[in-house]
Image (cartoon, helix red, strand yellow):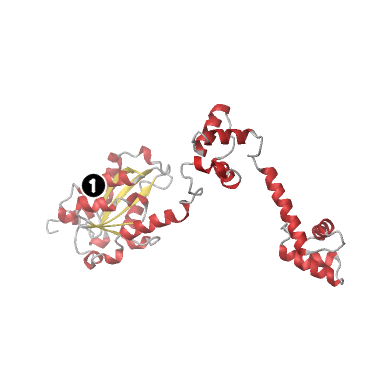
């Protein structure tokens, strides 16, 4: 039987069954789902002096014991080294992090955690609140909701795939790209891939797994192509593509995003990444893959006849004069 504390409702049930006088402790224990020994200890230790077990007084006694136990576990108590260090530091207008960090530096061990210092100030040391830099703010107040608001704000800036021109869906022109990153085994090294939807032409660049690195590589890559061959880009929702506004401004491309977890909306790119995995299988550490080696892999893919192109190569279609 799993251990759980006896609740206030349990105590009400125990009191009512005892008052009826028709159930023993074993039957009462089965009724509330506790062990007989737990119910026996509860009744034996919390019965009033007149011999009656009352739910209200028993629950009050249990709360008192828990409060006392919590007090024993507190690390910042009157007369303690922790209290002296905390008060001395805070009165110098040090932050709780600085108080704890300084003690760790001088003594080689953490006194308490910054969270414990904040909890003490707001619970028992309210006279120290004016010494906090943000005296009117509770600990971690900004944590709740702020990240969600930022994410919603960023999401609202994205142009979703539904708004993409119909011509992009029809694959009737060169210059509509899909982009993603292939991640190396070390997680920090990536290969940035762009695939033209009509020609299936692949461009790939070694990058770090950051938005800044991806932006720089994308700008360098598309600077090689004429304006008529860089019209739109469709990406996934990774943070590596968070600099999309600057990318639009500097390339003139319209940037769109697939919906989260809808990888099939960038099926051309996903399929081509699979082709690249022939040369860079999962588990490969990309730190040893130079751009020159990557270019060789890409050329092998771009010069491979494709059935969907009537057995022309992506390179031939992409470089076709009529396009």
State the quadrant of the C terminus. Answer: bottom left
Label 1: state its secondary structure: helix
Q: Name the residue under label 1.
A: 219
Left or right of 187, for residue 158:
left
Q: Residues within 10 Å of mark 1 (few under 14, many from 20)?
A: some
Residue sitting at 21 percent across and 52 percent down?
249
Q: Can residue 58 be seen in this view?
A: yes
**Residue closer to the observer: 157 or 7:** 7
Q: Is residue 236 visible?
A: no
Residue 163 vertical placement versus 242 (above, below):
below
Could you tell me how many numbered marks the image carries?
1
Residue sitting at 56 percent across and 41 percent down?
117
Residue sitting at 53 percent across and 36 percent down?
90
**Residue closer to the observer: 8 or 1:** 8
State the quadrant of the N terminus. Answer: bottom right
Q: Which quarter of the picture shows residue 312?
A: bottom left
**Residue closer to the observer: 58 or 126:** 126
């Amino acid at each position: 039987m799993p251990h759980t504390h006896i609740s206030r409702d349990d105590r009400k049930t125990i009191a009512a069954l005892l008052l009826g006088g028709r159930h023993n402790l074993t039957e009462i224990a089965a009724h509330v789902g506790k062990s007989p020994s737990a119910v026996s200890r509860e009744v034996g230790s919390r019965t009033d002096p007149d011999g009656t077990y009352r739910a209200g007084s028993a629950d009050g006694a249990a709360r008192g014991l828990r409060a006392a136990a919590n007090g024993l576990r507190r690390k910042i108590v009157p007369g303690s080294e922790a209290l002296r260090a905390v008060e001395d530091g805070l009165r110098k207008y040090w932050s709780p992090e600085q108080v704890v960090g300084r003690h760790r530096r001088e003594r080689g061990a953490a006194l308490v955690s910054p969270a414990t210092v904040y909890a003490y100030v707001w619970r028992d040391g309210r006279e120290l609140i004016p010494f906090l830099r943000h005296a009117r703010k509770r600990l971690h107040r900004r944590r709740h909701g702020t990240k969600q608001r930022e994410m919603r704000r960023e999401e609202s800036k994205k142009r979703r795939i539904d708004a993409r021109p119909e011509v992009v869906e029809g694959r009737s022109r060169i210059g509509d790209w899909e982009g993603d990153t292939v991640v190396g085994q070390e997680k920090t090294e990536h290969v940035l891939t762009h695939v033209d939807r009509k020609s299936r032409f692949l461009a790939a660049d070694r990058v770090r797994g950051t938005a800044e690195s991806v932006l720089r590589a994308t700008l360098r890559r598309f600077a090689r192509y004429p304006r008529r061959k860089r019209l739109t880009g469709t990406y996934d929702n990774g943070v590596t593509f968070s600099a999309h506004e600057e990318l639009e401004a500097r390339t003139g491309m319209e940037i769109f995003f697939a919906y989260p977890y809808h990888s099939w909306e960038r099926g051309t790119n996903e399929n081509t990444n699979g082709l690249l995995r022939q040369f860079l299988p999962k588990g490969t550490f990309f730190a040893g893959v130079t751009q020159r080696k990557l270019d060789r892999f890409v050329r092998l893919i771009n010069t491979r006849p494709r059935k969907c192109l009537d057995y022309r190569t992506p390179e031939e279609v992409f470089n076709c004069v009529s396009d």
